[in-house]
Image (cartoon, rainbow, N blue to C red):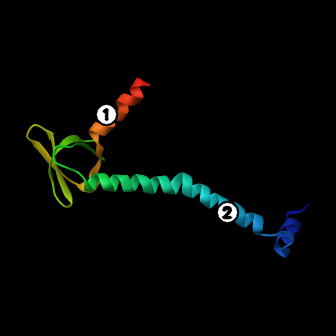
Amino acid sequence: MQPAFILLQAATGEQSPMPTIIMFGLMFVVFYFFMIRPQQKKAKEARKFRENLQKGARVVTIGGIHGKVLEVNDKTVLVEVDSNVKLRFEKSAIALDSTQQLTEEAVKAAK
């Protein structure tokens, strides 16, 4: 068959568009449940963690700096990274609680 003939058949509407619509719908559902939804859940947990930061918590920044929280303000956090070395970060730069990370690494190492 020639490509022009195939294109003419598709253009005349001999086939129903329903299977294509169903396929795209199923692809969207798969993308939602395997990619979009888990990412939204992870972002929600990170936001909740940043809102509940407290003095004394050990944290890791998105740049990989480990430290202890000394002060929490509305938008910033003062972190002590070494004795007499204090850095101020935006709350959005705090990635996770390092004690939680250490616990997860210990569980993985035990397996």
Instruction: Name the front one of labels 1 and 2.
Output: 1
The answer to which of marks 1 and 2 sits earlier in the sequence is: 2
41 lies left or right of 62: right
- Residue that appears at 35% across and 29% down: 106
User: Which quadrant is home to the C terminus?
Assistant: top left
User: Residue 101, located in which quarter of the rendered image?
Assistant: top left
Q: Secondary structure at mark 2?
A: helix
- Check disc 2 and report the residue beneath it: 24
Question: Residue 86, how many percent across, how many down?
Answer: 12, 45
User: Residue 17, located in which quarter of the rendered image?
Assistant: bottom right
Query: In the rendered structure, which amino acid carries the disc numbered 2?
Result: Phe
- Check disc 1 and report the residue beneath it: 102
Query: In the rendered structure, which amino acid carries the disc numbered 1?
Result: Leu
Compared with 101, 52 (above or below) is below
- Gap in Å between the C-alphas at discs 1 and 2? 42 Å
Q: Nearer the viewer, residue 106 or 10?
A: 106
- Residue that appears at 40% across and 24% down: 110
Circles 1 and 2 in contact, beta carbons < 8 Å: no
